[in-house]
């Protein structure tokens, strides 16, 4: 009797678990879109619906161009965002955006969702 109850519970809960995981990914994509619009758009054209052009002159490469890199993966992006590219030897490199790991994950989720379209 008890085993049947546990089995029934497992069956009932499974779709809920799968659904909540999908919702988590969708939420990361949404949050990543927001972060890209707010944090990256001063230098890059970061999203297609960006309200204003980048302030940086000349602008950094648009994300649409970056997404065409053959080596573009979530890992490559994560590594890029965790390191500093500006220094005495590279005065025009991108400054380290100093993001938390969960924010990098969200930006990567957003860019991967656009990449796969
Ligand atoms: C202060 C200006 C500035 C901001 C803000 C900025 N970037 Fe950049 N970014 C640059 C510049 C300049 C480059 C090109 C030079 C380089 O590769 O370091 C660049 C390059 C990149 C590249 C590599 C492009 C390539 O093909 O090598 C990625 C990826 C990137 N930025 C992502 C981001 C993301 C994501 C954000 C927002 C969290 C962001 N950038 C915010 C200035 C900026």
Image (cartoon, rainbow, N blue to C red):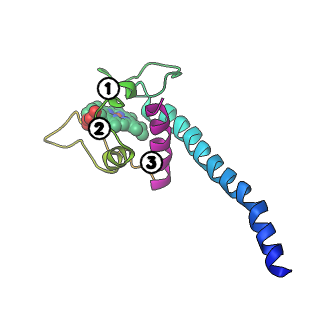
Disc 1 beta carbon < 8 A from ligand 1? Answer: yes
For image coordinates 41% across by 24% down, the residue present is 45
Residue 107 appears at what percent x and percent y? 47, 42
Say whether disc 2 or disc 1 marks the residue closer to the N-terminus: 1
Q: Nearer the viewer, residue 113 or 39?
A: 113
Q: Residue 81 carries which label?
A: none
Against 64, residue 96 (above or below) is below
| Residue under label 3 | 104
Residue farthest to the right? 1
| Residue under label 2 | 94
Q: Is 21 placed left or right of 71 in the picture?
A: right
Q: Which of 90 and 49 is in front in this view?
A: 49
- Callout 1 environment at 10 Å: few (<14), some (14 to 19), or many (20+)? few
Is 91 covered by the magenta stretch? no
Helix, strand or loop: magenta stretch = helix
Q: Quadrant of the N terminus?
A: bottom right
Say whether disc 3 or disc 1 marks the residue closer to the N-terminus: 1
| Residue under label 1 | 61
Residue 69 appears at what percent x and percent y? 29, 32
Q: Look at discs 2 and 1 and give the one toward the viewer.
A: 1
| Residues drawn in magenta | 101-117
Disc 3 beta carbon < 8 A from ligand 1? Answer: no
Is 113 covered by the magenta stretch? yes
- Callout 2 environment at 10 Å: few (<14), some (14 to 19), or many (20+)? some
Q: Is 108 placed left or right of 81 in the picture?
A: right
Residue 27 appears at what percent x and percent y? 61, 44
Image region (quadrant) for ligand 1:
top left
Against 17, residue 86 (above or below) is above
């Amino acid at each position: 009797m008890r085993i049947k109850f546990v089995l029934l519970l497992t069956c009932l809960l499974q779709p809920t678990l799968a659904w909540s995981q999908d919702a988590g990914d969708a939420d990361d994509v949404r949050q990543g879109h927001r972060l890209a619009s707010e944090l990256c758009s001063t230098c890059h054209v970061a999203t297609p619906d960006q309200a204003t052009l980048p302030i940086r002159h000349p602008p950094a490469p648009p994300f649409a161009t970056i997404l065409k890199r053959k080596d573009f993966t979530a890992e490559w992006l994560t590594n890029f965002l965790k390191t500093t590219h500006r220094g005495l030897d590279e005065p025009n490199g991108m400054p380290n955006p100093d993001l938390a790991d969960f924010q990098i994950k969200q930006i990567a989720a957003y860019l991967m969702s656009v990449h796969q379209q």
